[in-house]
Amino acid sequence: MKKYLILFTIVLLLALTYLFLRYFKTSNQAGLPQSTPTLTQTTPSPTASPSLVFPISQFKERITKKPFGAYITPQNSPVQPERFIGYHTGVDVEYEEVTTDVPVYAISDGTIVLAETASGYGGVLMIEIELDNTPHTVLYGHLRPSSLPKVGQKVKKGEQLAVLGTGNSPETDNERRHLHFAVLSDNRLDIKGYVQTKNELAGWLDPLAIF
Ligand SMILES: [Zn+2]
């Protein structure tokens, strides 16, 4: 009888050890940081948040003159001479010293909804994308007109859309070489670079806040 008791105890201990090891292994795994698959960037544009890519290289670093919402006048403007007045609806990304082509990229999957030349911009395009499941239009200004895509064209996140126009030429409507980049609060077609009241500025999002 004692023999069976000893055997039973051994079996019980083995079972308990097995269960303990199993539990320990599981809890240890859960305690480790999740190993995430390596994200491979398939486009030349730099990585932004997981769902968006930046519209141009060195996007944040090169916003050195006109940030979003700045009230610009010919007197206070960091750009001289200045012909505009009002609240800036986007950010200006500066490439004056760059002489090679500077591509701009789709920040997300979308559709080209506007591509034209316009006063104050030279070449300008808008794409419609989804942000938080809501349609928004995104504007890229001062582009080389001959590089513009066609309205209605579908684009993929990170796809090259156009290149910046040559500074101080009709391609940029005689502006310095830079990208005016704006994100609208909805999907309307509105290419205003400046608005005259703070209330109107609510029609645009701070582009730095979406990345
Ligand atoms: Zn601008």
Image: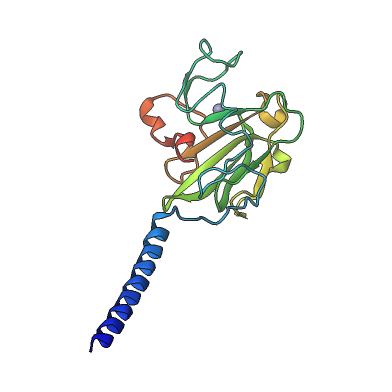
Camera-nearest residue between 200 and 166: 166
Q: Is residue 173 left or right of residue 73?
A: right
The residue located at (39%, 31%) in the rendering is 200
Q: Measured from the top left, where is residue 187 in percent x and y? A: 46, 46
Q: Quadrant of residue 142?
A: top right
Q: Is residue 35 left or right of residue 5?
A: right
Q: Which residue appears farthest toward the right when viewing the image? A: 100
Q: Measured from the top left, where is residue 195 in percent x and y? A: 45, 27
- For the image, the number of numbered tags is 0
Q: Measured from the top left, where is residue 188 in percent x and y? A: 46, 44
**Ligand 1 is in which quadrant of the figure?**
top right
Q: Is residue 126 left or right of residue 26?
A: right
- Against 150, is 146 above or below? above
The residue located at (67%, 45%) in the rendering is 44
**Could you tell me if residue 120 is visible in this image?**
no
Camera-nearest residue between 200 and 69: 69
**Could you tell me if residue 21 is visible in this image?**
yes
- Against 169, is 57 above or below? below
Q: Is residue 134 left or right of residue 80?
A: left
Q: Measured from the top left, where is residue 2 in percent x and y? A: 24, 85
- Against 196, is 109 above or below? below
